[in-house]
Image (spheres, rainbow, N blue to C red):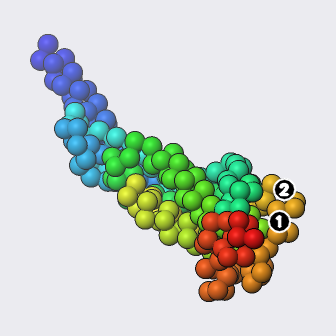
């Protein structure tokens, strides 16, 4: 009877010990909670947790990921539409923040990206939008990096897959002084004027 009791105790102890051993694969981290709050973050390797007190809340892949914004139309400053599609390359930068700071970091970042793209395009003529791809990518990248950091995300880059006026005639209406390629200081002033600046539509 005594031997049976000791055997049961030993089995329970072994089971608890096994339950406390957690393995984290290379390229992954595990966020551990204790008493319902963040306790620590485990890197790749084998770790021993306190049974019944610690639990793995989430496992996160540290590899590069891509957030895709499907094609959609945005209104330029001259009321023509521009078809836009882009992607955001990112990784997990702060595991704790990625788990606790935002319920759905990527989805909220996608919504913010959509808003920022529409805002940027509305300040340009449809014809000049494709020629300011690099400027837009850098501008959006800076905004997304700041927003991503608050969500535990390390944004690497914003890249456009499509950035074209939806109507062919709109693509040919570049205003005087605005040349294909990066905008000059003078051209930038006109480009920022909704409706095309002094030489654009609405000013005759």
Quarter of the image where the C terminus is located: bottom right
The residue carrying mark 1 is 171
Q: CA distance from mark 1 to mark 2?
A: 7 Å
User: Is residue 93 in view?
Assistant: no
**Residue 9 percent across, percent down from the top left:** 18, 25
Say if mark 1 contacts mark 2, CB within 8 Å.
yes
Give the numbered dot on residue 190. Answer: none
Q: Position of residue 39 (x, y in %)?
A: 23, 49
Q: Position of residue 178 (x, y in %)?
A: 74, 80
- Of residues 47 and 43, the one nearer the viewer is 43
Specify the farthest residue to the left: 2
Q: Residue at x 71, y 65 (%)?
A: 202
In the displayed structure, would residue 135 be above or below residue 164? below
| Number of other residues with Cα within 10 Å of mark 2, as a class: few under 14, some 14 to 19, many 20 or more | some
Q: In the visual, does 175 lie left or right of 87? A: right
Quadrant position of residue 13: top left
Q: Is residue 124 visible from the viewing direction of this image?
A: yes
The front one of 199 and 168 is 199
Residue 33 x %, y %: 26, 43
Residue 157 position (above or below residue 101): below
Residue at screen point 82% across, 62% down: 170
Q: Quadrant of the N terminus?
A: top left
Q: Is residue 33 left or right of residue 178?
A: left
Residue underneath mark 2: 167
Secondary structure at badge 2 equals: loop
Q: Residue furthest front?
A: 204
């Amino acid at each position: 009877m005594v031997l049976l009791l000791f055997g049961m105790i030993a089995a329970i102890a072994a089971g608890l010990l096994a339950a406390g051993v957690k393995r984290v694969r290379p390229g992954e981290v595990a966020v551990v909670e204790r008493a319902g709050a963040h306790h620590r973050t485990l890197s790749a390797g084998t770790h021993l947790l306190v049974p019944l007190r610690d639990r793995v809340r989430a496992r996160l892949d540290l590899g590069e990921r891509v957030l895709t914004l499907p094609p959609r139309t945005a209104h330029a400053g001259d009321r023509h539409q521009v078809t836009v599609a882009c992607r955001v390359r990112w990784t997990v930068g702060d595991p704790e923040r990625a788990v606790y700071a935002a319920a759905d970091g990527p989805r909220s970042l996608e919504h913010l990206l959509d808003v920022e793209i529409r805002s940027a395009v509305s300040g340009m003529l449809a014809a000049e939008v494709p020629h300011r791809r690099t400027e837009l990518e850098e501008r959006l990248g800076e905004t997304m990096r700041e927003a991503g950091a608050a969500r535990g995300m390390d944004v690497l880059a914003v890249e456009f897959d499509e950035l074209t006026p939806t109507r062919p005639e709109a693509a040919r209406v570049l205003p005087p002084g605005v040349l294909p390629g990066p905008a000059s200081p003078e051209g930038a002033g006109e480009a920022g004027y909704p409706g095309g600046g002094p030489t654009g539509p609405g000013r005759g």
